[in-house]
Image (spheres, rainbow, N blue to C red):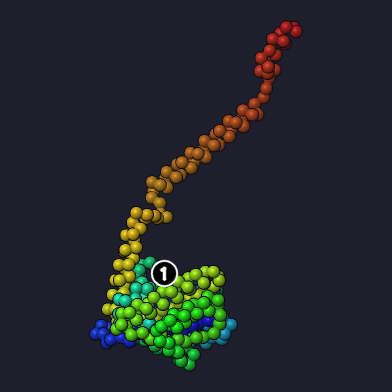
Amino acid sequence: MITILSIGLAALAASASAETTVVVLEYGPGGSVHRTAASAAAESSPAAVASFWNVLHRPSSSKRSPSMGQHAGMSIVPDLFKRPDAGIVIGLRASSLESMPNAASLLSSEDVPATNNVVGRLRVRGNVCTELVKLVAPDGDVEVVEVGEDAGRRLLSTAEAAARGLGGIEALSLVVDVSDPKAAAAADEKLGRMLVALTDLAASNGKTVVLHLVVEGTAASTSAALAAGRRLQEDANNADANSYSSNQKSMYEIQSFNLYLWTSVGLFVVVAMVMSAFIGMPLYPDTLLFGESGKMSSSD
């Protein structure tokens, strides 16, 4: 199943260079998408992104021409044997994400790609959000939905359908005026609810759902979103400063563990050998009861 949601945000023209980022998130058991050694900062193309979607979500039984394979050199690739049960594509066009912390957090933490279920990111030059969404929409037809309670329910119903692994293709376009901070915040809050619902429903149903968030904006807006996300991450890290933990062990801890372990094993082996020898020790007549030796001498 591939559900396409295009969130169009009316944006002002910006002097900085335009850029579109495709954030790939995976929910549920996972294992259908993997990162590669290629740099996440490398630019992709609309054709490369379309090839990735095609290989990931097209049924394995369908006939695929050689030209429909995924382009080489991408930072994210599908698994060869496991496919997701459902897919969702959300298009988000905005000149600024300052009022949308949930969307901004998905663009942050480049050094920790697993944050917020993020597997990786693909970057495309130019404002190509609409073009990318139309590549996977049936006949390029995308339904437009205005922001409101109906939009929130529509996003949640899309998450529920995807978490059940239902087949079909659905196209939606949620239009928001980014110049209105309240409208942008409302859209971001609905997006956050959808992400939470996907996390819970996909895990409970045992279905793997891949969400593709196509964020369109300027390079400056993307950098601002990354900076905002880093600040949120730093605040979270500072809140947990007194409870920091790590699975890595120092050389001293490793040596101490080995010393205590093998010392305990050696002492146990020595005690076991001594007890075994003591139990199996032969008994002689003069070592039995304390009066046995005297009885033997008097009988003589």
**Most distant residue in the front direction:** 149
Q: How many discs appear?
A: 1
Residue 185: where, in percent of width, then height? 35, 77
In this view of the protein, which residue sits in the foreground, 282 or 247? 247
**Most distant residue in the right direction:** 299
Residue 157: where, in percent of width, then height? 50, 80
> Residue at horizontal 48%, vertical 42%?
261
Residue 116: where, in percent of width, then height? 41, 69
Q: Does 150 sit above or below residue 102?
A: below
Residue 103 found in image quarter: bottom left
Left/right placement of residue 164 relative to residue 250 reads right
| Mark 1: few/some/many CA within 10 Å (<14, 14-19, 20+) | some
| Residue type (three-letter) at the residue carrying disc 1 | Asn
> Residue at horizontal 31%, vertical 63%?
235
Left/right placement of residue 243 relative to residue 271 reads left
> Residue at horizontal 27%, vertical 83%?
17
> Residue at horizontal 28%, vertical 75%?
224
**Most distant residue in the left direction:** 15
- Whether residue 139 is visible here, answered yes or no, is yes
- Whether residue 75 is visible here, answered yes or no, is no
- Quarter that holds the C terminus: top right
Q: Residue beneath label 1, please? A: 116
